[in-house]
Image: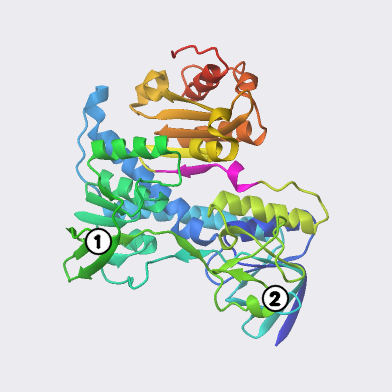
Amino acid sequence: MSDHTFDLVVLGGGSGGYAAAIRASELGKSVALIEKDKVGGTCLHRGCIPTKALLHAAEIAENVRDAAAYGVTARLEGIDPEGVRAYRDGIVAKKFKGLEGLLKARGITVVAGEGRLEANRTVRVGDDRYAGENVILATGSYSRTLPGLEIGGRVLTSEGALALAQIPEHVIILGGGVIGVEFASVWRSFGSRVTIIEALPHLVPNEDIALSKGLERAFRKRGIAYSLGVRFQGVTQTDDGVTVTLEDGTAHDADYLLVAVGRGPLTADLGYEEAGVVLDRGFVRVDESLRTGADGVWAVGDIVPGLQLAHRGFQQGIFVAEQIAGLHPVPVPDANIPKVTYSSPEVASVGLTESQAVESHGADSVVSYEYNLAGNGKSEIIGTTGLVKVVRRKDGPVLGVHLLGDRVGELITEGQLAVGWEAHPEDIAPLIHAHPTQSEALGEAFLALAGKPLHAL
């Protein structure tokens, strides 16, 4: 058995873990980063990056189909699954190689193996022990399923969907959240028939109702079917397909069932509770500084209750590393973290929905404004519909920014600045948005809320 000592030991090499390792190294700390698979975690290898590569390939397919509308003669010959896979995997491999280079350049010791937390801020990997003055837990998440719903065969999680070697003719997607609607967009663009089953009344149910309804309209127009407000009952499968039954007695046949009901924290059987870390339904309980109940042990990323987003993991990893180094960073509440769903059209938001704002401040204290992208020149040029919705406190700051439309994920940072800095629409209205850009749609909404609309009534 070998013992190794570092200033910081990070268990988990995903977004939060490697961000913490890099920032701590920048601040002069010796760091061991322990990862049982590949550094980069789910986001790089099985989540954010590969799925967005698929979505871009899907966008290109749609552009070819729609080329005649722009005066371009083109014909879509078909989808080459192996070609798409090669493009996607090439992006992942390049990002992975770059990350490995960054870690090496920072002098971070990367340990390959499955780690288990022990007492006294120690992580065991096989016969080796890695002790740190501080330990950061960043073990990530896994694809959930429903009780009694077994994954296997033609019942897939997102990881299984990414591994498919062919384009299915018809897919049923269980879950109308982020993962579900993104895969629905990909498969529909690749020519599949898609049916989404969502137990709640709307798609992307955590978003403002205006975005949910707008996405539903867009999906209807694209030919994506969905069943809302009805619970899943069961599934049977054969060698050729699946039959999904719902509690209302309806049944749906398809080639595959994708289970996209969210992700759970990877914390079981890792020694957390034995080492004094308190778990709540599998999530690590932390204070506002992300300290756990065990001395010198911190937690970041998907194992911490709240939004499960890679950029939240990055921010939390940096935040904890700076605290360990004696700095005094300011925590960022989840409400101020932007969210993007990369469906077609995209959904992006930050801050409070209108209903959340009303619940917090009262109906008489909240004002909202919606600007339709039909009035935005650049949106019309690229052929997208959608909207901008801004929620403010009456005579007060911006509380939430909500966007629907192609490419609007690129706009949400301005919304984050407005919400995070508690800006008033009157503060933002004088700022100049270049013409013609989609960012003008945000500018129009702020102008309207400031009482001086330009291209809107």
Residues in magenta, as a range: 333-342
Tag of residue 247: 1
What is the quadrant of residue 97 in the picture? bottom right
Please provide percent x and percent y for residue 47: 45, 56
What's the residue at 61%, 64% (across, down)? 138
| Element type at mark 1 | loop
User: 390 or 299, which is in the foreground?
Assistant: 390
Residue that appears at 65% across and 54% down: 316
Of 100 and 30, which appears nearest the observer?
30
**Corner quadrant of residue 456:** top left
In the rendered structure, does residue 341 fall within the stretch colored magenta?
yes
Q: Earlier in the sequence, mark 2 or mark 1?
A: 1
Note whether 37 is above or below 166 in the view shown.
Answer: below
* Local secondary structure at mark 2: loop
x, y percentage for residue 392? 57, 29
Q: Quadrant of the N terminus?
A: bottom right
Q: Amino acid at mark 2?
A: Gly
Give the left or right position of residue 180, taking residue 268 as reference: left
Give the residue number, with chain letter if any, for mark 2.
Answer: 276
Q: Give whichever of 95, 164 is nearer the camera.
A: 164
Q: Which mark is residue 323?
A: none
